[in-house]
Image (cartoon, grey):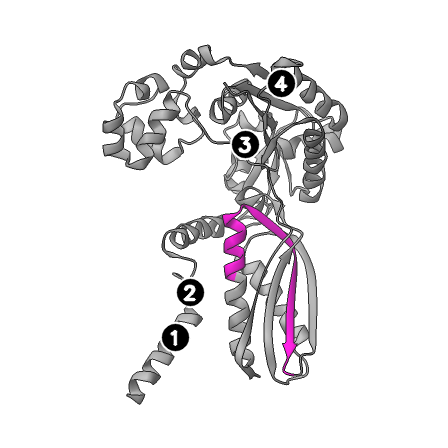
Amino acid sequence: MRSILHMDLDAFFVSVEQRKDDRLKGKALIIGGTGDRGVVSSCSYEARRFGIHAAMPVRLARRLCPHGIFIKGDFEAYERCSKQVTEIVQEYSPLFEKASIDEFYVDLTGMDRFFGCYQYALELRNRIMHETHLPISLGLSQNKLVAKVVTNEVKPNGYMELPAPQVQAFLAPLHVQRIPMIGRQTSRRLTYLGVRQVQTLREIPLHILERIFGKQGTLLYKSARGEDESPIVPAVERKSLSTETTFSQDSIDVKMMRSRITRMVEQLSHRLRKEHKLTTCITVKLRYASFETITRQKRIPYSSNDELLIQTALELFDQLYQKRIRVRLLGVRFSHLVAGGHQVALFQDISKQTDLYRALDTIKYKYGVNSLVRGSEAEKKLKKINKKEKGN
């Protein structure tokens, strides 16, 4: 039987801000975009009592909690704190997985022979809290799924061990949405079917769930029983993403080159979101026909936003391409990557864009990264087709 520890820093962004300023403790603190189109990325437990939650428009949050404290947030500080916690976990854990900027899984299987898994988990938690002064909750159980459920149930700043014989009884009365893999849409479908508690879900035969939900039905069946074989996956942090293109013929077509850069940035930003990453440094490379190669880079706020990344890359290209001589190669590179995905992208005032990117990414995941193109690209392809047809 495995012993899997799940740890989650409580209201992480809020906790970091409160650590910097004691006056924020106990206050309704809301972090996120501050403009009219901004969205909430995190909020204190005091603010949650007013119905505020992540991804809510800031305009609505202000109406619900007019006396709240609204701040933009400091992602660089959050990343530094996350790195500090990661180093502690890495030093004292035999095998761990960093699931997000504030969430960790640790495989403690076998530790009970030497120290006791739960005691070891508590010692690790105490060390993190002592060295970082940040609250952290933990759950220890037979697998990743159940350990995460336990952590969520004991928040904030709680801890609990759930032995295997007690898993079924613990899960039974919980609402189905408390199971991590069951999202809002699936929860609504289950509720429509009269399934609200895990116990009720557990009573539905496998073939019925598969008929209604397809392959997901198997996961629902296993999750209701607390079954999860997924392993701890040690993180190998990717430091950068890059792509480049060499033209079949050297070119001075500025419009074409700007279009190529736009396309490359779109592909890279899609990969960023797919891997739940953000970048803060963009580099554009240009190689002339003479093989002279020049680069220029710029730091930006952490982002995976197509519009911001494309705008920055095109600005760098315009600064680079001054000689007006033929170009052989173009390249784009995103570096200084950090974990974050949409969660941290919420700092930007792009609530509608965030939803749009999620929808576009869903299509790309299903049909391929080249299944969608911008209007300008489509227009150019259409002109080529028309030109070819006229030639025939």
Disc with the residue nearer the chain's start (2 vs 3): 3
Q: Nearer the viewer, mark 4 or mark 1?
A: 4
> Which numbered dot is residue 381?
1
Magenta part of the chain: 266-289
Q: Could you tell me how far apart the alpha carbons at marks 4 and 2 are, in whole angstroms?
A: 52 Å
Disc with the residue nearer the chain's start (4 vs 3): 4
**Tag 4 secondary structure:** helix
Q: Is residue 384 in view?
A: yes
**Residue 278 is covered by the magenta coloring:** yes
Question: Are discs 4 and 3 less than 8 Å apart at CB?
Answer: no
Residue with the mark numbered 3? 232
**Tag 1 secondary structure:** helix
Q: Is residue 155 in view?
A: no
Residue placed farthest to the bottom in the image?
391
Depicted 139 relative to depicted 99: above or below: above
The residue lying at 64 percent from left, 85 percent from top is: 325
**Which of the 4 quarters of the picture holds residue 250?**
bottom right
Residue with the mark numbered 4? 111
Q: Residues within 10 Å of mark 1 (few under 14, many from 20)?
A: few
